[in-house]
Image: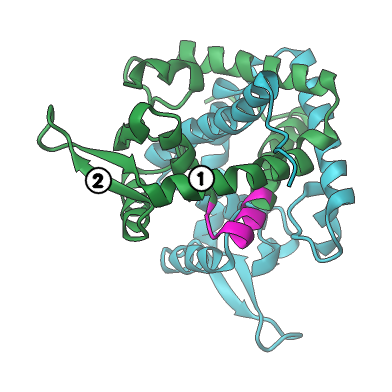
Chain colours: A cyan, B green
Amino acid sequence: MTDPNWLDEREQRAWRGFLAVNAAVRGRIARQLQQETGLSSADYAVLVSLSEAPGGRLRVFQLRVAADWEKTRLTHQITRMTARGLVAREPCADDPRGAFVVLTDAGWEAITSAAPRHVEHVRHWFFDALGPGHVDALIELNDTVTRHLLSTDGPCAPCDVPSSCDDVLP
Amino acid sequence: MTDPNWLDEREQRAWRGFLAVNAAVRGRIARQLQQETGLSSADYAVLVSLSEAPGGRLRVFQLRVAADWEKTRLTHQITRMTARGLVAREPCADDPRGAFVVLTDAGWEAITSAAPRHVEHVRHWFFDALGPGHVDALIELNDTVTRHLLSTDGPCAPCDVPSSCDDVLP
């Protein structure tokens, strides 16, 4: 076996920063949102996902919460949100074993009142740091990695890269 | 109340990509590592964190798993890893209520055999997509946001930004 091709100092710095900065920004926004609205970042992601779908309705596998969530964890998340009245389950006519998740009135109200605060936090913790050049560089970086993931994934890859998923929405 | 300053299309694209690409890359690496080594990404982060500390030993609050983890979740993680023999708890002489987490021989072996695979996946899913300009741009972006978080945080902020934490290591 050949020696591992370890990351050099610059790559190490880029990689660890890629993980740490993302987690630090998400963590700060999540804490503030939770304090102010009682919604966790997972609650918020589910509500946004549903609010943007036609009829506020999606199949569970279409919800984009986080790419690294196991199916069980997503099911528990939906069960808790159902118990709190933010979403409801509806049977799926085409698939007797499947179900839709639908935004309730309380869910619409929760996302409508949380969204203005959320965007404020995103600006405060993230965009306030960036100049226009940073935003351009970030978009270019995102697009480059997304193209790479799509071309590297096999045919049964997880559907969690933004541009690959638009066609699964009803 | 003034109208929310919603993200424009370009900002929306940058922000959603920032979240989605990071999660997609982490998800792919985590799935492969889990299949090959049985270690979750949280296991791996704890093992790396300990392996880089003097004596393979850290206080629980010094472990860098993920900035958005609640304390309870970290405690459960350590309990599971202790049961699997990857780490052990040791009493802390200076603080009767505190404890150290220490890497065991099995933990050293796990991280030593997983690290070469991990770096291979990081190259495959991430660095293989990037040119030197991308790496420079990413480091600059990380540093800019890190400086912003440090200057925006209050004095009791969570200790999860890389350059702010070096002084807590023993």
Queried whether the magenta region covers residue B31, the answer comes back as: yes
Residue A110 seen from this side: no
- Who's the residue at 49% across and 50% down the image? B110
- Residue carrying label 1: B111
Q: Please state which of residues B162 and B16 is positioned toward the viewer in this rendering.
A: B162
- Residue A90, position as x, y percentages in the image: 61, 78
Secondary element at tag 2: strand
Queried whether the magenta region covers residue A102, the answer comes back as: no
- Residue A4, position as x, y percentages in the image: 70, 38
State whether residue B8 is above or below residue B17.
Answer: above
User: Which amino acid, mark 2?
Assistant: Arg
Residue density around tag 2, few if under 14, some if 14–19, many if 20 or more, within 10 Å: some
User: Which amino acid, mark 1?
Assistant: Ile
Residue A63 seen from this side: yes
- Who's the residue at 17% across and 34% down the image? B92
Q: Please state which of residues A70 and B105 is positioned toward the viewer in this rendering.
A: B105
Of all residues, the one furthest to the left in this rendering is B96
Report the side of A139 relative to B96 (left or right): right
Quadrant into which the C terminus of chain B falls: top left
Point out the stretch of residues depicted in magenta: B29-40
State whether residue A153 is above or below residue B145.
Answer: below
The subunit letter for the residue under badge 1 reads B
- Residue carrying label 2: B89
- Residue B56, position as x, y percentages in the image: 37, 34
Foreground mark, 1 or 2, reads 1
Q: Quadrant of residue B101?
A: top left
